[in-house]
């Protein structure tokens, strides 16, 4: 990713100067969040409250996405053109990005929507290790599981599962309180093709919008801006 080539050589120095072996305070909104166990496979759960962080550059943080868009040139056009108006209309974030530091200065990150109704058990997500730099961050390995929550034209929440998630983000403020741009690539599993969704064109399924697929599913890309959860 772009940040890796431009800033990777500064990573060691930045972390050595700014981190300790203590685990940062857990963020408590935006993502169904629970710290992982240092292996990159920690699961998440629903929660409420605020992170209370004064400087998002050095503490556990959750950024809520806005202006999330599927580019019609990089995704199935019918899918992008059907979902983007729904995403623009909904008031709740479709996804959030949360991170925290584990022991030995290991930063972990997860992409997933907040589950405010079921406590996170039904829509749990995983964390993966990330590289972090003062200008931004990027995933070091794919995240196994996450979710996008879309409110469809019938006002129903459609939880779209994501797998094999990778991404990067660029900070939009010196205190890291915003992401000026985040870019994400993920797989929508083939099993999600039967999910019903109502768009401006009527009732359909994700599979009908996404079209032909491989045996694994559909590769999608999306971008968004985000702000720290308050």
Image (cartoon, rainbow, N blue to C red):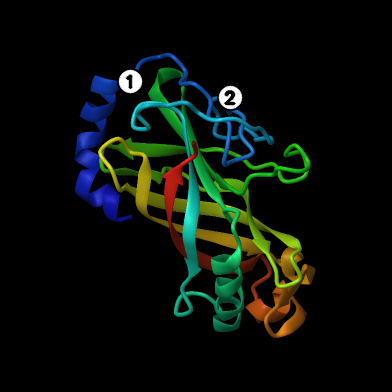
Q: Are marks 2 and 1 in contact (CB under 8 Å)?
A: no
Distance between the alpha carbons at the discs numbered 2 and 1: 18 Å
Disc 1 target residue = 19
- The residue most toward the bottom is 201
Precedes in sequence: disc 2 or disc 1: 1
The x, y position of residue 8, in whole percent, is 25, 42
Numbered mark located on residue 175 in the image:
none
Q: Quadrant of residue 29?
A: top right
The x, y position of residue 211, in whole percent, is 66, 81
Left or right, 158 with reference to 58: right
Depth check: give the residue in front, 137 or 67: 67
Q: Quadrant of residue 83?
A: bottom right
Q: What residue is drawn where x is 64% and y is 38%?
A: 32
Q: Quadrant of residue 177?
A: top left
Left or right, 115 with reference to 65: right
Left or right, 18 with reference to 24: left
Q: Residues within 10 Å of mark 1 (few under 14, many from 20)?
A: some
Tell me the element at label 1: loop
The x, y position of residue 163, in whole percent, is 61, 54
Q: What residue is drawn where x is 56% and y is 80%?
A: 81
Disc 2 target residue = 37
Tell me the element at label 2: loop
The x, y position of residue 191, in whole percent, is 76, 64
User: As displayed, is residue 111 above or below residue 40?
Assistant: below
Q: What residue is drawn where x is 28% and y is 55%?
A: 2
Depth check: give the residue in front, 199 or 101: 199
């Amino acid at each position: 990713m772009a940040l890796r080539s431009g800033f990777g050589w500064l990573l060691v120095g930045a972390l050595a100067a700014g981190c300790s072996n203590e685990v940062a305070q857990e963020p408590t909104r935006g993502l169904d969040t629970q710290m992982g166990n240092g292996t990159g496979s920690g699961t998440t759960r629903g929660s409420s409250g605020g992170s209370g962080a004064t400087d998002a550059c050095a503490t556990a943080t959750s950024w809520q996405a806005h202006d999330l868009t599927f580019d019609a040139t990089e995704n199935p056009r019918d899918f992008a053109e059907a979902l983007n108006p729904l995403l623009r209309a909904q008031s709740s974030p479709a996804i959030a990005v949360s991170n925290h530091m584990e022991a030995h200065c290991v930063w972990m990150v997860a992409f997933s929507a907040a589950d405010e109704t079921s406590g996170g058990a039904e829509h749990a997500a995983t964390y993966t290790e990330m590289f972090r730099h003062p200008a931004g961050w990027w995933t070091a390995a794919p995240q196994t599981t996450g979710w996008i929550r879309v409110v469809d034209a019938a006002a129903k929440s459609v939880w779209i599962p994501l797998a094999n998630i990778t991404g990067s983000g660029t900070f939009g403020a010196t205190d890291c309180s915003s992401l000026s741009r985040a870019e994400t690539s993920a797989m929508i599993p083939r099993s999600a093709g039967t999910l019903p969704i109502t768009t401006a064109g009527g009732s359909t399924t994700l599979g009908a919008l996404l079209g032909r697929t491989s045996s694994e599913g559909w590769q999608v890309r999306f971008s968004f801006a985000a702000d720290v959860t308050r």
